[in-house]
């Protein structure tokens, strides 16, 4: 009857647990909850980042939502970015992990490959972005030189980051390069935990490699898959560093995502209220996506 | 358990909201972010309400160790080095003054954060727009009397001190000592090869650009950011300075200004249409221009006089001239706001005032003027620098600036205008909009930002 209810007895019994949790809770309150509430409050004011704030109610939200083409551009780009960078690194990571764990590579070589795949994750994102910016440079970058050498001259004069048709793809490639190693390592670890006897039994029953992948490997790494997808989704929604370092949202506003839009409004236009409103909307959208995703996953489980 | 958690959460949210509430005003009751005495009449330093005369207040006590904190945008290697040398000059005279210099790239936001959190540096290096914002909240010391006492105007080029402070006529909040004039650099080798003459009017410039393009060279080396200076340059060469000033200070967009701006934008759009900029300009990194121009593919490069340093390092044979204008007799105005100016926080402790003023004064000396000139900047001081050791590239820039008056970086008229103009520049170069579209869109943005800025001021 009393299960789940906080009584003095229960509190005393689990005191050590609550005490151990307290510092984390305190940190959460100070560094997450209070700033989050402050952001909501700022979104209801007009503030230039200095001096007093003036209460404007929902005015910033109206500005943001009503007939604002830039907001729609940012929304579209954020959704595209999230879909691409949530699925492609996961697919590549899955493919790599399957090759490393289920392939016939010697153990040491497989470990070495894992390390190589994971390296981009270790490099600072800004450093990686600067390096890729150089690679894409239309005049001095090596990418166009390589294209020229292999005879693809029609593509060799493209300013990859300055062309509205290629900019988002070019940016997505960098993100995929950074994150697929992470997916690979997580999936490889999960795959190693699957009972080998399942594969042996499947082979006895005549299952092909493909059958084994779909019926044993994938269900076996379901939990890791959920974790990776939710994490990459969150990283994708809040992306800022790669895009800011490489294009600052340009050319024009062709690579604007929410975080860039919020930053520019907040720190170039001194519209911290509108910037906070954009951030709140980004958080809400991310929460809805995240909840929808986990709900679908939970339903699929039972 | 649920009740207890709900109560805890409610308590936390209340605490957070109360914490937020402290930041409000109109509604909010945010106190002036730093406690300080009210602004004094006549421009006396607010932090020094003592009975000492101003001269006494500004006399450095050699026996007292003082540390002053300074924040500036002097973050590049070139600027940091010059700052270090200037501080060394100060320390030769006042070894007891310790300067903690914090050079920051994103200095406007750093300054805002510093003042708003009550942790502002003692001295800041600010442009006129930021100065206007800080002054609005009484964060800056009125240094009119100090500037008079230290005779900074006497050693500065006529009007330069007032120019930096023109948003507040009669009051001085910051003191500039260098400027950043934009000139048109040209590749002398190509110029001689094609037998070209330095253009002074826009028509002559058009002829030269056409010849250069025909000869297979790229006429302009530029990035989306630097194409702003092409527009500014055209405007200053077409529109009377008074009309531009009215627009810049958010007073009025006169018909003359509007017509001139449209013509200027159409001129730049025409250059875009004729392919006078490097292909893929929207992908060009602004920081690479000093590397791209010396490659010898491009003839013109509109940039600051301080580009002389990198061009000298590349051993490039260059000349420089002011941006051409509509007719020879039209006044020459360079995109040339003062680089920024030194300002003192309003609530500076009295015991630091003399050291802070001594620090600023160290930039108004002959030695300092020579130091910054030789370092690649154009000094705003009147000291004779004919014997300064400058490279041929620097000399070209200095000569190009002679006799020209200072203009503005027009994107600095209101916060956000730079971003808006950069976006429109990119769209113009991507041929998504025409010069006329640009004109209409920038007018719309300007009016919006102007209304916002004026409402903040009121």
Image: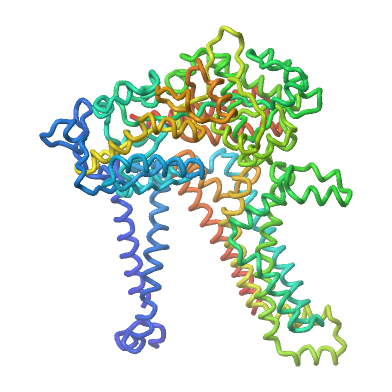
Q: Position of residue B112 (x, y in %)?
A: 38, 43
On screen, B218 above or below A137?
above
Residue placed furthest toward the left: B51
Q: Position of residue B157 (x, y in %)?
A: 40, 21
Q: Nearer the viewer, residue B31 or B64?
A: B64
In screen coordinates, is B78 left or right of A192? left
For image coordinates 80% across by 81% down, the residue present is A105
User: In which quadrant will I find the N terminus of chain A?
Assistant: bottom left
On screen, B355 above or below A1?
above
Instruction: Tell me the colour scheme of the image.
Output: rainbow
Residue placed furthest toward the top: B329
In screen coordinates, is B339 left or right of A143? left
For image coordinates 58% across by 14% down, the residue present is B238
Q: Position of residue A91 (x, y in %)?
A: 73, 67
Instruction: Evaluate whether residue A134 shows in this view.
Output: yes
Task: Identify the image quadrant of residue A200.
Answer: bottom right
Instruction: Evaluate whether residue B413 shows in this view.
Output: no
Task: Identify the image quadrant of residue B188.
Answer: top right
In screen coordinates, is A28 left or right of A252? left
Q: Position of residue B277 (x, y in %)?
A: 71, 30
For image coordinates 87% across by 88% down, the residue present is A206
Task: Identify the image quadrant of residue A237.
Answer: bottom right
Q: How many marks?
A: 0
User: In which quadrant will I find the C terminus of chain A?
Assistant: bottom right
Residue placed furthest toward the front: B387
């Amino acid at each position: 009857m009393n299960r789940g209810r906080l009584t003095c007895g229960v509190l005393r019994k689990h005191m050590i647990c609550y005490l151990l949790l307290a510092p984390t809770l305190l940190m959460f309150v100070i560094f997450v909850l209070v700033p989050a509430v402050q952001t909501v409050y700022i979104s209801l004011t007009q503030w230039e980042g200095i001096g007093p704030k003036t209460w404007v109610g929902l005015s910033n939200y109206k500005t943001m939502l009503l007939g604002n083409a830039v907001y729609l551009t940012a929304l579209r780009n954020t959704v595209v970015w999230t879909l691409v960078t949530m699925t492609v690194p996961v697919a590549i990571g899955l493919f790599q992990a399957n090759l490393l764990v289920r392939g016939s590579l010697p153990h040491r070589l497989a470990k070495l490959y894992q390390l190589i795949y994971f390296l981009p994750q270790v490099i600072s994102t800004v450093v990686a972005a600067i390096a890729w910016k150089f690679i894409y440079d239309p005049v001095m970058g090596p990418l166009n030189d390589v294209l020229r050498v292999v005879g693809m001259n029609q593509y060799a004069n493209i300013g990859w980051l300055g062309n509205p048709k290629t900019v988002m793809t070019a940016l997505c490639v960098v993100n995929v390069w950074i994150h697929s190693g992470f997916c690979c390592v997580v999936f490889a670890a999960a795959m190693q935990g699957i009972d080998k006897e399942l594969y042996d039994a499947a082979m006895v029953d005549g299952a092909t490699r493909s059958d084994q992948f779909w019926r044993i490997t994938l269900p076996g790494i379901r939990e890791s898959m959920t974790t990776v997808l939710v994490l990459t989704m969150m990283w994708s929604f809040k992306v800022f560093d790669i895009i800011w370092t490489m294009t600052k949202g340009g050319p024009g506003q062709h690579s604007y995502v929410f975080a860039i839009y919020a930053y520019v409004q907040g720190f170039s236009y001194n519209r911290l209220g509108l910037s906070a409103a954009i951030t709140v909307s980004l958080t809400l959208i991310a929460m809805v996506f995240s909840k929808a995703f986990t709900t679908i996953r939970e339903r699929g489980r039972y | 358990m649920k009740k207890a958690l709900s109560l805890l959460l409610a308590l936390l949210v209340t605490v957070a909201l109360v914490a937020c509430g402290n930041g409000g005003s109109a509604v909010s009751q945010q106190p002036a972010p730093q406690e300080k005495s009210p602004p004094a009449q006549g421009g006396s330093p607010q932090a020094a309400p003592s009975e000492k005369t101003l001269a006494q207040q500004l006399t450095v006590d050699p026996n007292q160790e003082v540390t002053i904190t300074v924040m500036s945008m002097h973050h590049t290697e070139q600027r940091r080095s010059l700052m270090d040398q200037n501080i060394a000059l100060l320390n030769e005279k006042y070894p007891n003054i310790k300067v903690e210099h914090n050079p920051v790239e994103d200095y406007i936001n750093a300054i805002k954060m510093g003042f708003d959190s009550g942790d502002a540096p003692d001295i800041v290096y600010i442009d006129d727009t930021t100065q206007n914002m800080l002054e609005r909240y009484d964060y800056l010391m009125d240094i009119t009397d100090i500037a008079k006492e230290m005779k900074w105007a006497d050693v500065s080029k006529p009007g330069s001190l007032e120019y930096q402070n023109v948003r507040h006529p009669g009051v001085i909040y910051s003191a500039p000592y260098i400027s950043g004039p934009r000139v048109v650099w040209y590749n002398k080798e190509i110029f001689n090869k094609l037998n070209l003459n330095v253009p002074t009017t826009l028509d002559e410039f058009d002829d030269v650009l056409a010849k250069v393009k025909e000869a297979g060279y790229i006429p302009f080396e530029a990035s989306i950011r630097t194409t702003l200076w092409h527009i500014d340059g055209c405007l200053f060469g077409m529109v009377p300075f008074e009309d531009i000033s009215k627009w810049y200070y958010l007073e009025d967009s006169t018909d003359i200004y509007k017509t001139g701006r449209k013509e200027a934008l159409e001129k730049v759009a025409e250059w875009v249409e004729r392919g006078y900029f490097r292909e893929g300009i929207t992908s060009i990194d602004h920081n690479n221009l000093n590397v791209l121009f010396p490659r010898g593919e491009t003839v013109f490069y509109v940039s600051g006089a301080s580009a002389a340093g990198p061009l000298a390092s590349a051993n490039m044979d260059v000349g420089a001239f002011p941006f051409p204008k509509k007719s020879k007799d039209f006044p020459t105005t360079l995109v040339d706001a003062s680089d920024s100016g030194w300002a003192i926080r309003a609530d500076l402790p009295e015991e630091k005032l003399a050291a802070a003023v001594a620090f600023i004064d160290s930039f108004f000396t002959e030695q300092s003027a020579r130091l910054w000139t030789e370092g690649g900047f154009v000094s705003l001081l009147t000291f004779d620098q004919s014997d300064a050791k400058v490279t041929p590239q620097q000399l070209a820039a200095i000569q190009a600036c002679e006799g020209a008056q200072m203009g503005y970086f027009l994107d600095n008229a209101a916060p956000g205008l730079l971003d808006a103009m950069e976006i429109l520049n990119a769209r113009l170069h991507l041929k998504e909009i025409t010069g006329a579209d640009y004109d209409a869109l920038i007018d719309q943005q300007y009016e919006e930002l102007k209304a916002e800025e004026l409402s903040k001021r009121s």
